[in-house]
Image: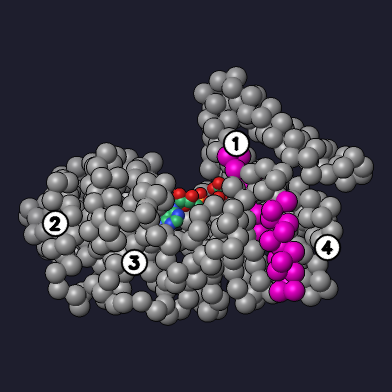
Amino acid sequence: MIVMKFGGTSVGSAERVRGLGERVREHLPRKPAVVVSAFSGITDLLIRGARFALHRDPAAEAAVHELVTRHNQAIDELVPPGDVKSRLLAHVEAVAGELRILYTGVHYLEELTPRSLDAISAMGERLSCQIVAAALERLGLPARAFEARNILVTDDSFGRALPLMDQTQARVREMIVPFVEAGGVPVMGGFIGATRAGVTTTLGRGGSDWSAAILGSLLPAEEIQIWTDVDGMMTLDPRVFPGAKVIAEVSFDEAAELAYFGAKVLHPATIKPAVEKGIPVRILNSLNPGAPGTLITREARGTEGEPRAIAFKKGIAVILISQPRMLMAHGFVARVFEVFSLHRTPVDLIATSEVSISLTVDDPALVPNVQKDLMALGEVKVLANMAIVSVVGRGFVQRSGLAARIFHALRDVNVVMISFGASDVNVSCVVAEADAERAVKSLHREFFGESR
Ligand code: ADP
Ligand code: ASP
Ligand code: MG
């Protein structure tokens, strides 16, 4: 068995869905289970609509309308008139009706909780999974849609739910495995799940990759394929620098580090279930299916001490806590971290000096509460709109001259904070968001040259 996950751009139009069908057909002998994202742009549309509703802006209704139009058009192009088509159109109508009710609730309550937002943003995958399954059937493939909320069981941390693996395992065994073994192709929406009580949850933005890895580890699959719109994991986001090169093979820990520090091509949590079962993950291009892609494996071949890629992540806040009297007194750092733990706020980078400690947080919405409590411990300063720029690769610590090359490349950029990961796979710096592109291009030039 293998898992084939198709991202938003691979299900962006009727033509792309047909291409998806071809990829599935080619892999039929390997017993694929398919995971799909929402059609491209739909999750953003749903969230945008929710914000309109919150601000009592009538544009929320336009979002519902656009949702219906996009999906009905895809159905028209993919499924001929008949029972299946009528059922799909009714499904779109029902989901749109539900969305309208939720938007109305948000509008009148003037409140958008993470729980409501999950119910709203899950609708894209609820639609795409039914439409893709019907389209595959139409192409003569033995496909059937499986409602992800009946399979992926999660806790109730809305907006960033954690999978409950034992419960999910039971459902996968009961529903998916027998179907695949009988030669069927299950199609499940990624990104979404439900609590044990059946309340809709999501795994966080970009979470379909994670759904694919969870399913892959539970089947278990012999390979997890992430089909997207680029040739693989590259030395830098190709949208920022089109000359970036494809990385043929990378280790799980390097890929995790790259994903965590902003290489959006893969959701960072994807790696964990795959590593635990030793299942290789392959990133492939649905627009260029002949390309070899990137293979992520336990051990990758490659030169130790050479960077593999540059990543960056914007929208970071730096929190600086100074306390001249207390900092290195024992217990101080623990108290600082207690505050972060209390507010369930993850920290990315940390740097300390004798009198201060600086940390980065990648969700600015979480900063105000933390800031308030930290003020009891010392003087607190917050720098917003920052970016983390990371050089990722193995064996950095053993390599002399590398830091010099990084600083040389960043000589014209104001670096606010530096962290040399003890895990030996990355060096990260914090710069102003406005400097991020310039910084990563310069680092890319230093380590990978200019070539196109
Ligand atoms: P999907 O909808 O298939 O999940 P995403 O938009 O989530 O696609 O991820 C693919 C995008 O990730 C690419 O279009 C690319 O711009 C971006 N990206 C960022 N960093 C990298 C990188 N290092 N290598 C490849 N793609 C990257
Ligand atoms: N549709 C979701 C998102 O846009 C999940 C995903 O595509 O991975 O974030
Ligand atoms: Mg993605």
Q: Amino acid at mark 2?
A: His
Magenta range is 18-42
- N-terminal of the two: label 3 or label 1? 1
The verdict on label 1 being within 8 Å of ligand 2 is: no
Camera-nearest residue between 281 and 417: 281
Q: Amino acid at mark 4?
A: Pro
Helix, strand or loop at label 4? It is: loop
Residue beneath the point at 38% across and 41% down: 365
Residue underneath mark 4: 142
Question: Callout 3: 10 Å neighbours few (<14), some, many (20+)?
Answer: many
Magenta highlight on residue 27:
yes
Residue underneath mark 3: 308
Q: Residue furthest right?
A: 82
Question: Callout 4: 10 Å neighbours few (<14), some, many (20+)?
Answer: some
Q: Amino acid at mark 3?
A: Arg
Residue beneath the point at 14% across and 73% down: 400
Drawn side of residue 300 relative to residue 210, left or right: left
Residue underneath mark 2: 408
